[in-house]
Amino acid sequence: MEKVVVIVDAVHGRDQLAGEPLARAQVEAADELILSKPLLAKYGDLARLAATIRVLNPTAVISAAEHGTPVSLTLGSALPFPLPVVAAMAEPIRPYRIEVGKDGGWIALSTWLSALLQSRGDDVVRVKGIVRAPAGLLLLQSVRRMVQPPEILPERDAWLSGPAPEEGMIVLIGRNLDGELLERSWRRFGA
């Protein structure tokens, strides 16, 4: 039997459920809900988030995982977060590809990306990309303003099967962003 599994970010879940119609619809439709990053969330907030998703979906199985490894949680009882009515006509979430180059402009890119996330972090849902830095190829990932430490990847000749990842490209996923403005901003900053 097929089931719908939804990952709920334990750190950002409250805000996503408060303002994102798609997040609520996904939680309501799930058969199983997995709280990700539970060790980064405050205990009281985690218990309240679990109570909130229980209100939205009383029949789903709720569990937790940290870096893909199941985590045992004893949440006890907590009051759910109050959730406002969200407008169903929110601006859609879209991907934006930005070519940042393969020349290793790591300092410019990290500064530009930090400024973007500081100023527009509520609109940027995810960032992913592979870029060149002095340490080698780096995998960049973020969720909202929370940037994961870059992961050093093997060089291209070490990719034995399948295509090597696309280097020098980042993808921003978000809403209320202008792709042309993002491109112009990066070109000015990275020049």
Image (cartoon, rainbow, N blue to C red):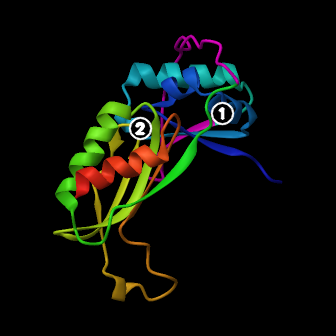
Is residue 55 toward the left or the right of residue 145 in the image?
right
Q: Is residue 130 left or right of residue 10?
A: left
Q: Which mark is residue 35?
A: none
Asked whether, in this view, residue 66 is left or right of residue 24, the answer is left
Q: Position of residue 140 (x, y in %)?
A: 34, 57
* Residue ID for mark 2: 144
Q: In the rendering, at what x and y percent does residue 142 appear?
A: 38, 47
Q: CA distance from mark 2 to mark 1?
A: 16 Å
Packing grade of label 2 (10 A; few <14, some 14-19, many >=20) is: some
Label whose residue precedes the other's in the sequence (2 or 1)? 1
Closer to us: 54 or 148: 148
Question: 190 and 66: which one is in front?
Answer: 190
Q: Which residue is mark 1?
A: 22
| Quarter of the image where the N terminus is located | bottom right
> For the magenta stretch, what is the residue range?
62-88
87 in the magenta segment:
yes
Q: Secondary structure at mark 1?
A: helix
Q: Residue at x 71, y 26 (%)?
A: 57
SS assignment at label 2:
loop
Q: Position of residue 92 (x, y in %)?
A: 62, 37
Per the image, is 135 magenta?
no
Query: CB under 8 Å between callouts 2 and 1?
Result: no
Give the vertical position of 131 relative to 89 (above or below). below
* Mark 1 crowd level (few <14, some 14–19, many ≥20, 10 Å Cα): some
| Residue 11: quadrant of the picture | top left
The amino acid type found where label 1 is placed reads Leu
Q: Is residue 67 above or below residue 48?
A: below
